Amino acid sequence: MEFLLAADAALPVKGAYGFLGGRGSLMLDVVFLAMFLVVPVLLFSVYQVKYLRRYQLHKQLQIVLGTVLLIAVTAFELDMRFFTDWKALATPSPYFDATKPWSCPVGYSLIVHLSFAIPTLLLWIVVIVQALRHFPSPPQPGKHSAWHRRWGMIATAGMVMTGVTGWIFYWMAFIAT
Ligand code: HEM
């Protein structure tokens, strides 16, 4: 134990805790909360384009969401690589087994989460780049519409599942006692 910044001094964890009252780091808490904003804004954006044909609003919202997500993912990765040992934070959880971190309920839930999060991130980059290349500006339906509607729906579902599985992992690893 090198130093303690935890509210609960019984937890031998190096690094600062976040603000949600669990064992999440600052960045984990930021991303956990950000997804409660991202998912509704995403559904709002798809509703706007699908039922109200507000193409420009949809474009702007998707670019903002894409940028927010890219910044969040980068900050999160840096945090996980260099600052936060999520396994140490998860150790008090009854769903975590530090001797087999990837073969316990927390580990399984992280694998499920990552199998949505990683393909979804790549798909978002492709959907945004293709939309910017193939739709006119300001955006209007056209030859690219069929491809975009299909993969846009898959990208939307992927992001919702990334959020839901991320919240489940967060709860199991950093809240449950
Ligand atoms: C990852 C980012 C994006 C996602 C997930 C996404 C998702 C969607 C979805 C699900 C629809 C279909 C709605 C329906 O069923 O009618 C749609 C339609 C549309 N999107 Fe996106 N979109 C994204 C980015 C963009 C961008 C950057 C642009 C503009 C450059 C754009 C322009 C459009 C247009 C013009 C339509 C209407 C297509 C049509 O109805 O013919 N989208 N989008």
Image (cartoon, rainbow, N blue to C red):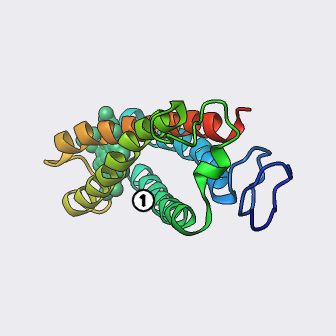
| Residue at the farthest left position | 143
Residue at 54% across, 42% down: 99
Position of 11 with respect to 35 (left or right) is right
Q: Position of residue 168 (x, y in %)?
A: 57, 33
Nearer to me, 59 or 35: 35
**Type of residue at label 1?**
Ile
Position of 142 with respect to 28 (left or right) is left
Q: Residues within 10 Å of mark 1 (few under 14, many from 20)?
A: some
Residue at 71% across, 63% down: 15
- In the rendered image, which quarter is residue 175 located in? top right
Q: Is mark 1 within 8 Å of ligand 1?
A: yes
Residue at 67% across, 49% down: 89
Residue at 23% across, 37% down: 150
- Mark 1 secondary-structure assignment: helix
Residue 47 visible in this rendered orientation of the protein: no
Residue at label 1?
Answer: 63
The N terminus lies in which quarter of the figure? bottom right
Position of 129 with respect to 49 (left or right) is left
The C terminus lies in which quarter of the figure? top right
Nearer to me, 94 or 138: 94
Q: Across the whole image, how many numbered discs are drawn on residues? A: 1
Residue 4 visible in this rendered orientation of the protein: yes
Q: Position of residue 174 (x, y in %)?
A: 67, 42
Q: Position of residue 111 (x, y in %)?
A: 42, 39
- In the rendered image, which quarter is residue 46 located in? top left
